[in-house]
Amino acid sequence: MTRINSFEDGINSLEEDLYIRAINEFRIEFENNVLYYLVNHLLSKKKINSEYLKSEVKYLNKLCERYYIKKIKLKINSEKENRIVDEILILIKRAKKAIDYSYLDIADFYYKQSNYFTKLKLNKNFSIILKDILVNYNHNIPKKISKAPKEEIISKNKSFSGENFKEFKSKIYQNFSKALKISIDKFFLKIYDYLIETDLKEINSPKMYFLKKDFVKIGKKYSKLKYNVKIRNKIPKNIKDCFLDEVAANLFRVKEIFIYND
């Protein structure tokens, strides 16, 4: 159920709501996994070896501020690797890049479909995140997004709840990568549910067409009903097709996060 099984109520048509909401929910879940598995581990350390951590501390501390977690303050030796932490950071870099590029595409799509895009109702928090990413990449900011306020950071030193995380430390990479793979599956399942629910008889989208084998695979994995809509390798004919083509582009990005790891 693409509308019911979501963090937010749908406020647009099914296709445009799916486009915006699916990537936003993936980002939120990804950020929480980063905090739960990696940041929590780092907060338990006073010093650590890692070739990649120093370049990612700024991003990790921004997440800490966003979710009211204590910032990471530890000594980092960049001359030596920490295989587990560095492998997690490689996955984080790939996932973050996939998310950022998906958000950047939203702005590009705005310029391609500006007359229609102005009708979209965007969640305030989503607009804030989108504007922040556009600024970071020196991207043109659509008028619809330009009035979004800057992300407000409230400094609070909250730590995680008193749960025992010791069992994760020996398998921290396995647990993080498993959680990330589940998030990717959820992303695909949201689109799969749409394909079951839609009243459309056909979808014209080359990008969606080349994901058909992935949809079959995810459908079998989770015992899903078969969808009836025909997906054709043709140029999008209408705005619904255009939105779904953009959704498929995002699926390709998250699918490739593990391309070098499996």
Image (tube, helix red, strand yellow):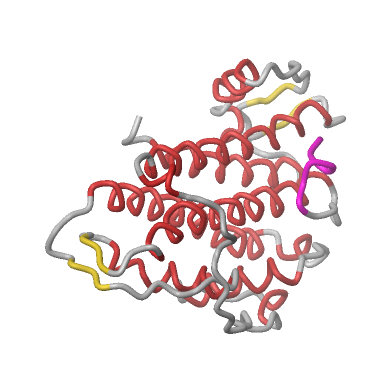
- For residue 218, side relative to residue 48 (left or right): right
Pick the front one: 16 or 257 = 257
Q: Is residue 43 left or right of residue 182?
A: left
Whether residue 247 appears in magenta in the rendering, the answer is: no
Q: How many marks?
A: 0
* 81 shown above or below 133: above
Examine the residues drawn in magenta and state their main secondary structure: loop
Quarter placement of the C terminus? top left
Residue 200: x %, y % from top left: 83, 30
Residue 97 visible in the shown view: yes
The picture quadrant where one finds residue 160 is bottom right
Residue 16 makes an appearance in the image? no
Residue 77: x %, y % from top left: 18, 67
**Residue 223 placement: quadrant:** top right
The residue drawn where x is 52% and y is 40% is 179
Residue 115, picture quadrant = bottom right
Query: Which contiguous range is marked in magenta?
Result: 1-7
Q: Which residue is drawn at 87% across and 30% down?
A: 199
Q: Where is residue 193 in the image (x, y as percent from the top left)?
A: 75, 31
Depth check: give the residue in front, 162 or 13. 162
Quadrant containing the N terminus in the rendered view: top right
Q: Residue at x 57, y 73 (%)?
A: 158
Question: Above or below — where is 197 with respect to 30?
Answer: above
Asked if the stretch drawn in magenta spans residue 6, the answer is yes
Which residue is outermost to the left? 79
As drawn, 178 above or below 92: above
**Between 96 and 47, which is closer to the camera in this rendering?**
47
* Residue 4 position within the rendered picture, expressed as x and y whole percent measured from the top left: 84, 42
In-front residue for pair 115/137: 137
Image point 59% across, 73% down: which residue? 68
